[in-house]
Image (tube, rainbow, N blue to C red):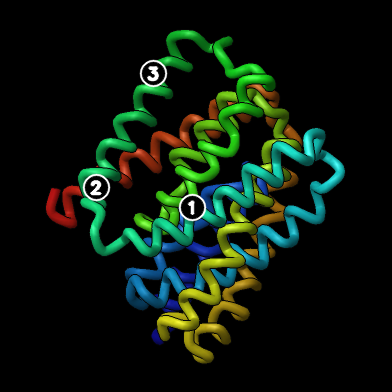
Amino acid sequence: MDPVSLAFAFIGILLGGFLKGATGAGAPVVGVPVLAIVFDLPMAVAIFSVLNLCTNIWQSWAFRSEVTEHRFVWIFAVMGAVGAILGSVLLASLPVPLLMASLAGVVFAYIGLRLARPNWHLSRARGRKMGPYVGFVGGVMQGAGGLSAPVSITFLNALNLPRKEFIATIAIFFLAMSVTQVPALAALGILTWDRLLLAFLALIPMFLGIPIGSWAARFLSKQAFDRLILSLLAVIAVKLIWDATQTGL
């Protein structure tokens, strides 16, 4: 790999780490497209499966004291892992492009609602009731389309969680799905030993970016953090529509 491509991959992963450190999510949104350009999509997915596993183990542990409702968080996460398995099974039969475009519409509708009514949010009581179902649907989306964030991040943002509790919750959710995804990719021959080695090397820029993002987020108010999450959701929704059009919607 030439030095320019190497630098491009390094910067892409570094930026993904910055976003992960600041918000607890979003690293694959930046990093996977960059690695897909430098390598190819299967390699990008394989590398980020390992990065997601490692970073979410770290953030789950680092922010463990911020979890205030352990039952809610773990049911949410376990249902996500179960949904990811089902989504992987359904991958071949679901009309994924149409599904992704529809999901993008839901995300844009939510963003519009939050902009029109900035103080609107779900109550904790309603969130506890919805958590298992939302977690399951997010897991299915992860397994079928490779992206649960439009469901999981939208839901947690609607609960108006403080930044650290948001990061702890989403990290445990992503970790639960990574635990099922990594062995599945290895069994399918997508995550090979060579790609595993590259993933471990990619941890260097990732873990350089995370503390920088975490440091920068200290200067964000609750309102600024909320706007950052909404911006991330908007980028994800645009990516969903783009992917849907490129895959034959």
The tag on residue 83 is: 1
Residue 200 in the image: x percent, y percent? 62, 79
Q: How far apart are marks 1 and 3 (CA)?
A: 28 Å
The tag on residue 5 is: none
Q: In the rendered image, which quarter contains the N terminus? A: bottom left
Say which residue appears at 86% left-offset and 43% top-offset. 65
The residue singled out by tag 3 in the image is 112
For disc 2, the neighbor class at 10 Å (few under 14, some 14 to 19, many from 20) is some
For disc 1, the neighbor class at 10 Å (few under 14, some 14 to 19, many from 20) is many
* On screen, residue 99 above or below 160: below
Residue 195 in the image: x percent, y percent? 49, 84
Residue 151 in the image: x percent, y percent? 46, 38
* On screen, residue 89 above or below 187: above
Amino acid tagged 1: Gly
- Secondary structure of the residue carrying tag 2 is helix
Do the numbered discs 3 and 2 sit on residues whose CB atoms are within 8 Å? Answer: no
- Secondary structure of the residue carrying tag 3 is helix
Q: Quadrant of residue 146?
A: bottom left
